[in-house]
Image (cartoon, rainbow, N blue to C red):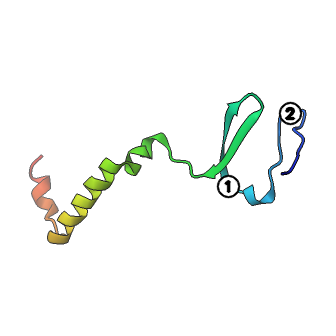
Amino acid sequence: MEIRKVSSKSQLTLPKEFAGKLVSIESLSEGILQIKTGEFIPHSEKIFHTEEYRKRLKKFDQWMDKHHPEESNIEEFQGNR
């Protein structure tokens, strides 16, 4: 266990192994903090990390294995304006 002093500006210096990493700080109760390293996932990207999305992506990958890309005729699409 290490003891460190919180500065007058409420700052705490963490050990070097935390350098450059993102951390979450959770207050578990009065005077008890839990610090965890982790990755930040923006709210707009959280859906990509769900089981439902993984299933849809797997289904799409299976479809792609059976349907190879074909060249499109852009003039066909422009004619539909």
Direction from residue 32 to residue 45 in the image, left or right: left
Tell me which residue sits at (51%, 47%) in the image. 41
Q: Residues within 10 Å of mark 2 (few under 14, many from 20)?
A: few
Q: Which mark is residue 73?
A: none
Rendering coords of residue 3 (x, y %)? 88, 46
Q: Which residue is mark 1?
A: 21
Distance in Å between CA atoms under marks 2 and 1: 21 Å
| Count of marks placed on residues | 2
User: Against 64, is 27 above or below?
Assistant: above
Rendering coords of residue 5 (x, y %)? 90, 41
Q: Which mark is residue 9?
A: 2
Task: Judge by depth and name the residue closer to the eye, 23 or 73.
Answer: 23
**Residue 68 appears in the figure:** no
**Residue 46 appears in the figure:** yes
**Callout 1, which amino acid?**
Lys
| Residue 54 position by quadrant | bottom left
